[in-house]
Image (cartoon, rainbow, N blue to C red):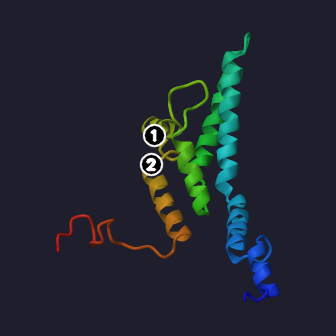
Amino acid sequence: MNPKPSSAAKAGSRGSRTNPIRQARRTATARSADDPIYRAIEEHRKSGQERYEISRKPGRTDHELDDAIANELDALRRLFSTAPTTHDGMVALFRHCHTALPGEYTTVIEEFVEMCVNGDEDKWSSTRWARMMELALRRIAPTHDHRSIHGREGAGHRG
């Protein structure tokens, strides 16, 4: 004979309000929405699309295109100066990095690297960005394991 489930059991199986797994997912999603990287990604996408549209606009002036390019580069610099604060934000940033710029074959990360090589080094630094990403990842995942995927200390360890 199966007894009737308790009200707590019913509530736990119902889901959205009391299920701890669903609550954790909602909390993580809410925190992800607050991640500043999403705004930086969106601003970069928008400025790239605007630059592309202006470049194809009949009768556009060189000044209009120069302004659009400058806006896109400013958005790119802000993107690579913004540290994600959540795991989902980190994933979103890296996904955005390998997307092509509107109307081009160049990816976002390739454009960033080109600016690091050819741009003003006070504004563009791949080393500074890599360090910022390392620190952001350490904050996002504070319990990290220093072992390699093979369970050994460091890459050169043979013991």
Which quadrant would the C terminus be assigned to in this image?
Answer: bottom left
At x 73%, y 67%, the residue is 26
Q: Nearer the viewer, residue 2 or 134?
A: 2
Residue 53 appears at what percent x and percent y?
70, 23
**Mark 2 element type:** helix
Q: Is residue 110 above or below residue 137?
A: above
> Residue 87 at what x, y percent from top left?
58, 62
- Residue 132 seen from this side: yes
Q: Quadrant of the N terminus?
A: bottom right
Residue 126, numbered label: 2
Q: Callout 1, which amino acid?
A: Val
> Which residue lies most toward the left here?
159
Residue 118 on image: x %, y %:
45, 35
**Residue 101 as seen in the image, left or right of residue 144:** right
Classed neighbour count for the residue bearing mark 2: other residues with Cα under 10 Å, few (<14), some (14–19), many (≥20): some
- Quarter holding residue 47: top right
User: What residue did someone put label 1 on?
Assistant: 113
Q: Check whether the beta carbons of the residues at disc 2 and disc 1 lie within 8 A of each other.
A: yes
Compare marks 2 and 1 and give the one earlier in the sequence: 1
